[in-house]
Image (tube, rainbow, N blue to C red):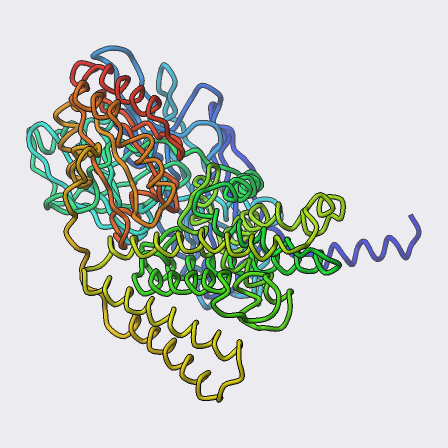
Amino acid sequence: MRFPALLALLLAMLAAPLAAVAGPVNTGHIEAQLVAQDASVAPGSTVYVALRQKIQKGWHTYWRNSGDSGAATQIAWTLPAGWKAGDLVWAVPKRLIEGEGEFAVAVYAYEGEVLLPVAIQVPADARPGTTAHLKATVAFLVCAEQCVPENADLTLDIPVKAGAPAPDPQWGRAVTEALAKAPKPAGLDARFAADSQTLTISIAGAPLAGADLAGAQFLPYSPKALKHRADPVLDHGPQGLTLRYPAGYSFTKGTPLAEVDGVLVLPGASYEVTATPGAALPGTTGLGPPAAKARLGLLLAILYAFLGGLILNLMPCVFPVLSMKAASLAGHGGAARAEGLAFLAGVVATFLALAGALLALRAGGAAVGWGFQLQSPPVVAALSLIILLAALNLSGVFEIGTSIQGLGSGLAGRGGLIGAFFTGVLAVVVAAPCTAPFMGPALGLALTLSPIAALAIFLGLALGFAAPFTLLAVTPALRGRLPRPGPWMDVFRHVLAFPMYAAAAWLVWVLSQQTDSLGLARLLIAAVLVGFGAWLWGLTQARPLAAYWQWAAFLVLALAVLLITRDPYGPARVAQAPAAGKIELESQAWSPARVEALRAEGRPVLVNFTAAWCVTCQVNEGVALATPGVAAALKRDNAVYLVADWTNRDATIAAALSQFGRAGVPLYLVYGRDGGPPRVLPQLLTEGLVVKALDEAAATPPAAAAK
């Protein structure tokens, strides 16, 4: 090596931060060592030093509560003057069952490699340029089929330097990860109730709403709180969960505990919890044992969203807009490619705007999901009037612009590009009441991810929804297969108005399910005013009239808008009796408590999460639920039909949907008699599928018998 290169290497080595130095000690079954988060410490700072245990395969050491046997690892520090050590930060242990039959015991233990950090406070008068010598005497109980006490005297030399320390190059990341994974308080509220037989702990809080609760465990700090060998009986609700254990010695024979503290362990998360005496917290029961959530990866979720967007074009709620899109291509020409891209831009912009509003509302604590805008009566009323205007335009009552690019071109009167853009906007707004296959899991995952990842999933949905029309518009070969323009287009345009009238009528019916008769009357009057205003506007276009006729049209339309937005809407009207001859299933209102009560009786339960504005829901109810076959199956199987109506906002229903990874309706659940998790039915139902699910639920043995 040449001298300049050697000199540079030496200078680099001198400039590099000195690392904390410690050597491992082999105790017989453990390789023990002190490792530091930082390579050096500064006066007045805090550094985390971890006790590293690399445990021989087949052996284990113990957590702070060892369980039915064993002993926790103990550590005693010898530190320089003024230095102080905190408590061990305990990692989440494994629950191991040792022995068999009535002699089996459960312990909380560590296997393999584990790091237990300790906060070391450095005094402000520590001198830079010196090296601190830390010593720890550690006592382990390490067990397999037999237990062996082992000890180690561990040391760590760590430099004291002025300025911010750098992470230790070898162990800094590992110590940081151990601290990040260690259980911490998360503001969870917890209550417990105990007698000589059972300890019941209910836990609620924001981290649990929508979380994966399958296989939850509570690891108590007290060895006498519960029977460690028993698995908990789990129940959950929109806000949290309840765990029931056989009571421990403190409640069966000893002095009852004033509080029960420990660690709640969930898939991928753990939280420190302190439960105080009291009744079970609301929202922690009623949905039964939590089922494991199927977790999609981000790329797979985007693919699901794209496929869902494609299928959304075939859903009933989008048929009127498909008519508008067909009308916009009927007069195809050289601008078709640009109009297709403008339509794509309108779809993408609207999907992302809706997604942004949805994510912002949820971040603010609102219980909303896909289609949330249709849970607002003023929005439903306004949308019905917009679609009515589109229908009147297609019928020739008035003209805005000379093309038939749809309602959007009318909004600006400046050619096909703006019209195509707003056709895309309206297409998304009208499509919102539908949930296509593949959409549910993808959107449910989106609401649990970061905003950027969530918007990526919604972008996939937008691209899938816009793809067929955009592909047709930008591909000359496909456009060439369309009919040539001619007089037939005027007739076709007028025909296309009727699906839009049907869509407007459907939205009026939706409003009738959300509000009282006065709210419905206001919308009907507003619809008449919109028709009158559109006719006035068309009159000014057909013949030369004074400008005040246009102002009169604007005034009438403004009065219609004022009528639907001025006052709050009253509560929903009472449902009327079904029409003669119509199949009406006997149903009850859904609630978590009602589900829990019915399951306790051992009865199968069919739950329908629905909404009046959800077209997919209405189609399913007409063709697959309100049928003689399902009615007979409910009676034959002694099953109960529960309806969770999300037509108006309901935080409990929104939380329950989130528990099953859904962002909106429909959702269909069938609970069997065995007390297990419910079966989730597809979003598109058939009568035979529902009947089969009910019969299979009734065929499962009751929970008591299954045990």
Residue 25: x %, y % from top left: 52, 33
Residue 213: x %, y % from top left: 33, 37
Up-down relation of residue 533 to residue 75 (above or below): below
Q: Residue at left 59%, top 65%? A: 419
Side of 142 where 515 appears, left or right: left
How many numbered markers are drawn?
A: 0
**399 or 516, which is in the foreground?**
399
Inspect this view and state whether residue 505 appears: yes
Up-down relation of residue 113 to residue 345 (above or below): above
Up-down relation of residue 153 to residue 453 (above or below): above
**510 or 4, which is in the foreground?**
510
Q: Quadrant location of residue 255?
A: top left
Q: Residue at left 57%, top 47%? A: 460
Hey, which residue is sitting farthest right in the picture?
2
On the rendered image, what quadrant is the C terminus found in? top left
Inspect this view and state whether residue 140 appears: no
Residue 54: x %, y % from top left: 50, 30
**528 or 559, which is in the foreground?**
528
Q: Residue at left 29%, top 13%? A: 99
Residue 195: x %, y % from top left: 6, 33
